[in-house]
């Protein structure tokens, strides 16, 4: 059994950690897609769980590289060139202020929301490229609301490619048996 966990919101990190470990303990393969590593720094996944960081996959795309060049890398080079000798300390403070007060805010409040706005449908290609090549998932677990558009994009991608669509669930308990013999899908195990 291969299970893909979409945990982009990081608000149910414990569930993603425990359920992915359960898949591995049951002899399956688990892949967890997270947005950024920072909110997950204290979460320790089982060593057999593959963790894919979406922000790193996105960083390779041309619009993100252009934004990073214009907002961060270019100004850093200018500050480094100007800030030599006696101006080093003063230019260092200005550079830090520029990044924290302007560049980071523009990135978080303007560029990132605009860039990701339509990604519910277009994210499947980015996520799929970051997954193992032999990944044929039996189940996609959507652990939080932020992951819903990404799950919809993956399902649309499966349908467009003519590949059987994996089952969707909000947790392993809601997935039911994966052998396909039970009609009670979506019903928690304790409610049966």
Image (spheres, helix red, strand yellow):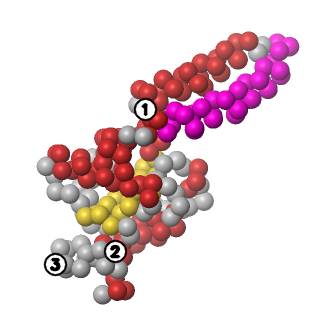
Picture quadrant of residue 68: top right
What residue does disc 1 label? 60
Residue stretch in magenta? 85-113
Extreme residue toward the right, this view: 86
What residue does disc 2 label? 174
Q: Is residue 83 visible?
A: yes
Report the front residue among 119 and 28.
119
What is the C-alpha distance between the residues marked 1 and 2? 35 Å
Magenta stretch holds residue 99: yes
Q: Is residue 82 left or right of residue 145?
A: right
Sort mark 1 into few (<14), some (14-19) or many (20+) by Cα contacts within 10 Å: few
Q: Is residue 37 left or right of residue 95?
A: left
Magenta stretch holds residue 13: no
Q: Residue at x 76, y 15 (%)?
A: 83
Whichever of labels 1 and 2 marks the residue nearer the N terminus, that label is 1
Extreme residue toward the left, this view: 162
């Amino acid at each position: 059994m291969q299970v893909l966990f979409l945990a982009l919101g990081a608000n149910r990190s414990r569930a993603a950690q425990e359920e992915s470990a359960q898949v591995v303990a049951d002899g399956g393969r688990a892949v967890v897609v997270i947005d950024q590593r920072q909110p997950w720094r204290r979460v320790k996944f089982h060593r057999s769980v593959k963790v894919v960081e979406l922000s790193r996959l996105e960083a390779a795309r041309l619009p993100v590289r252009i934004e990073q060049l214009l907002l961060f890398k270019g100004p850093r080079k200018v500050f480094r060139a100007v800030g030599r000798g006696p101006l080093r300390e003063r230019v260092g403070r200005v550079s830090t202020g520029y990044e924290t007060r302007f560049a980071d805010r523009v990135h978080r409040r303007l560029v990132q929301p605009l860039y990701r706005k339509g990604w519910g449908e277009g994210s499947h290609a980015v996520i799929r490229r970051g997954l193992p090549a032999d990944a044929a998932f039996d189940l996609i677990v959507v652990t939080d609301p932020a992951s819903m558009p990404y799950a919809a994009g993956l399902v649309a991608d499966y349908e467009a490619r003519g590949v059987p669509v994996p089952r969707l669930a909000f947790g392993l308990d809601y997935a039911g048996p994966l052998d396909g013999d039970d009609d009670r899908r979506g019903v928690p195990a304790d409610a049966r």
